[in-house]
Every structure is written in structure tokens, then in C-alpha cells.
Amino acid sequence: YILAASFVNYLIDNYKLNKFLEFFAQNEFNESDSFVHFYGKAGEQLINEWKIKISKTNYGELSDYEKEYLSKIEQLLVH
């Protein structure tokens, strides 16, 4: 949950709450089009930007569980 919350926080901080609420409220989620439609970027690109941002923090190294969960999030958003 922590990584998902971090990604959501990234979207809200960088693209504003209203944009996230519109994205979250959509009736149909199409993995390949929804991120582009709402954010102007593919899900994979947003994930990469988020990963760069969190890598610059002082949160420390991710645990194996967190790395595995991050991988699952990436798979959901990219495929």
C-alpha cells in the first residue's frame, strides 16, 4: 500500500488533485490509453518519473517486498 500511495501522491503533487480525481473517476480504464488521456504520458513514463523522484529521497533502500510490489505495479500500468 505504501508504494501505491507514494505513486498516487506523486501524481497529485505533480499533476494536481483535480486531474487525479478525474482519472480515478473514469468509467472505463484502458491501460494503454487512460494515462495518456489524463496525464499526456504513458503509464510507464509516469512510473519512471516517479521512480526517479523517490530515488532522490532519503527513504533508504527498498525492501525485497517493496521491490516485488513495485514490479507488480509496473506490470499493471504498462501492460
Image (tube, grey):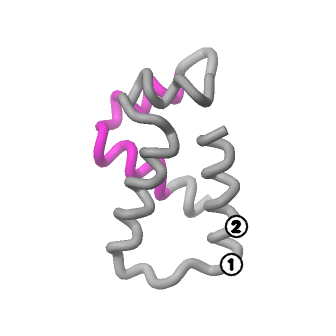
Q: Amino acid at mark 1?
A: Asp
Q: Which element carries disc 2, helix, strand or loop?
A: helix
Residue 23 part of the magenta-drawn span: yes
Quarter assignment of residue 32? top right
Q: Quadrant of the N terminus?
A: bottom right
Q: Amino acid at mark 2?
A: Glu
Instruction: Name the disc covering residue 64, or none.
Output: 1
Q: Position of residue 14 (x, y in %)?
A: 29, 45
Residue 48 part of the magenta-drawn span: no
Q: Dot 2: within a 10 Å radius of its alpha carbon, few (fewer than 14), some, or many (20 or more) residues?
A: few
Magenta segment, prevailing SS (helix, strand or loop): helix
Q: Position of residue 69 (x, y in %)?
A: 68, 62
Instruction: Name the disc covering residue 68, or none.
Output: 2
Which span is picked out in magenta? 6-25
Q: Position of residue 41 (x, y in %)?
A: 40, 34
Q: Total marks drawn?
A: 2
